[in-house]
Image (cartoon, rainbow, N blue to C red):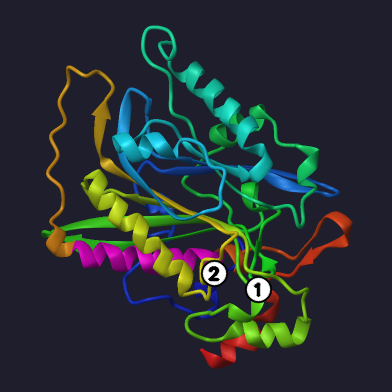
Amino acid sequence: MTSRIRDLGIEIGRMPTGPENTICDVQGVKVGHVTIDEGSIKTGVTAVIPGEGNPFREKFIAACHVINGFGKSAGLIQIEELGTLETPIVLTNTLSVGDCLRGLVQHMLHVDEGIGSSTGTVNSVVCECNDGYLNDIRALKVEPSHVREAIESASARFEMGDVGAGKGMSCYQLKGGIGSASRAVESGGKNYTVGALVLSNFGEMEDLMVDGVKAGREIHRALYPERLREQGSVIVVLATDAPMTSRQLKRLCKRASVGIVRTGAYIGHGSGEIAIAFSTSCRVPHDSSCHVHLSPVSDDDANRFFRAVVEATEESVLDSMVCSSSVEGRDGHIRRSLADFTELFLKGC
């Protein structure tokens, strides 16, 4: 795996990380990518698998929060209403939501023969960011089959940076993409994990902060990039093995915005900022005759989980940039890797 922000000696926050410092430190979670890199096509699909088995028959308690709603995601309404997640979470570019939705539906129909026949339909979840600066987004190169490929390739060990859905993304006018981190949390005498994965595509260069250092100003002086009004998107996926209600998970989602802002963003008008959280500790059966017995963590320990979300989200954004290579896309547009400018911000750390 490409060097991460911690490999540069920068440790975000003060909480301990999980063993691999990714969302997959939450047992059962896997991540898979399909990257499409063909000339002016710089895009792809990333799939987050919440756990083993059939998520339609054994759903995950979940929540979502729209920080700023300039987005075209699918499936959020039912998560908001019912508080459950019943498919993998698929990430892609803005104009490929429909194709990925079809691909995810096809996958779930293969997983469960009763969907749409002997039982109800499925709420497939697809989120997006606009990669049109580097990617010829009008070419519509993402196909439904790419969703199946991403899901089948999913593993607890996965690449970050300009891969999968992150291939064509920009962050602070540098290269954005996929990043992930985790934190260990103690609550009620038990140890839990909170993991984050981000798809980053937002921010003005001069605003970029790296662990409190105004890195973007120094990089801006070196590059003098095109003028940009803050407009972009970021999707944050949060996972935990702590037993939580949908209400508690929604509170985690809201704290993702703090992690984003700590990297310098101010959540601009044209930005789609969305967080989804799920817990793997308790599955909700599709069969209404079954009952769920949940003993959630105490709200007295909420701040520990809030801090974990903030730190993991902030670090995920930075990893999405440091792990990315510089990319030249459509019309000669270039996004440089944050890793190219370490000497400009490490001196302040």
User: Is residue 154 shown above or below 11?
Assistant: above
Residue flagged by tag 2: what amino acid is it? Leu
Kindly identify the residue that appears in the image at 65 percent across and 73 percent down: 338
Name the chief secondary structure element in magenta: helix
Determine the image quadrant of residue 194.
Answer: bottom left
User: Is residue 180 shown above or below 47?
Assistant: below
Q: Which residue is mark 1?
A: 338
Q: Are the residues at dot 1 and dot 2 in contact (C-beta closer than 8 Å)?
A: yes
Quadrant occupied by the N terminus = bottom right
Based on the picture, tell me whether residue 323 belongs to the magenta stretch: no
Outermost residue toward the right in this view: 331
Q: Which mark is residue 132?
A: none
Kindly identify the residue that appears in the image at 38 percent across and 30 percent down: 86
> Residue 153 in the image: x percent, y percent?
57, 37
**Start-end of magenta stretch:** 302-319
> Residue 133 in the image: x percent, y percent?
76, 57
Callout 1: SS: helix
Outermost residue toward the top in this view: 118
Determine the image quadrant of residue 103.
Answer: top right
| Front-most of residues 162 and 171 | 171
